[in-house]
Image: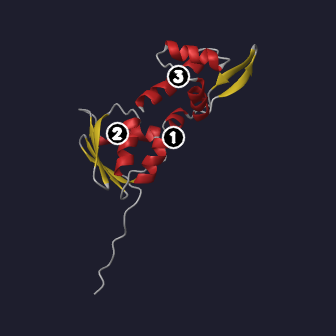
Amino acid sequence: MKKRLARLQTVQQLIKTYRIDSQERLLSYLERAGFPITQATLSRDLKFLKVGKVSDENGYVYALSEGEEPHIIFGGYINDFLRGYVSIEWSGNMVVIKTYSGHSDSVALALDNMELTEVLGTIAGRDDAVFVCLQEGITGEDFMNRIKKIIPKLERVKYFKPKTEEVI
């Protein structure tokens, strides 16, 4: 999966850097960059990235959607994370993410694939928690600031179960 993310980022960079007017030209740039893929795979990537063609002085060229890069690349992972997490707490460089039952694997996988250099690794609990170990010198607060740039609508605590009163 990380290879696909690297390829998607390379496609974006190529489109930003060069005037690319055809899939054949983009395929050749990708091959030189170490990503030999088929035309069908490139078509899926372009659709996923919401790349379109725009007119310039010499014809039509590929262009990226403006202002959505992290959300486009990590969109599925962001949705998995938001759908699964309940709360985020930390102490020093250790973070615990509580999840809804059965969502710990998808939340950990989402974090692993968001290319967060601050994260050393994640461990998904059996059912409803994810442990995140951060790089030395990175705090939970640093982690939250970084992840909020990728997921702007993230809240530290999304949901707390109401306390139930004991019935006698």
Number of the front mark, 2 or 3: 3
Kind of residue indicated by mark 1: Gly
Residue visible at 63% across and 17% down in the picture: 24
Distance between mark 3 and mark 1 Cα atoms: 22 Å
Where the N terminus falls, by quadrant? top left
Residue 6, numbered circle: none
Sequence-first disc among 2 and 3: 3
Judged from the image, the secondary structure of the residue bearing numbered disc 2 is helix
Residue 81 in sight from this viewpoint? yes
User: Mark 2 — residue?
Assistant: 143
**Between discs 3 and 1, the one toward the N terminus:** 3
For mark 2, does the 10 Å Cα neighbourhood hold few (<14), some (14 to 19), or many (20 or more) residues?
A: many
- Image quadrant containing the C terminus: bottom left
Q: Along the polypeptide, which appears first: circle 1 or circle 2? A: 1
Residue occupied by mark 3: 37
Q: Relative to residue 147, is residue 161 depicted above or below?
A: below
- When asked about the image quadrant of residue 46, the answer is top right
The label nearer to you, 3 versus 1, is 3
Q: Position of residue 116 (x, y in %)?
A: 37, 34
**CA separation, marks 2 and 3?**
34 Å
Residue under label 1: 75
Q: Where's residue 86, x and y in %?
A: 38, 56
Residue 79 appears at what percent x and percent y? Answer: 48, 47
Q: State the residue in front, 106 or 97.
A: 106
Q: Nearer the viewer, residue 23 or 20?
A: 23
Q: Along the horizontal axis of the image, is 140 left or right of 11?
A: left
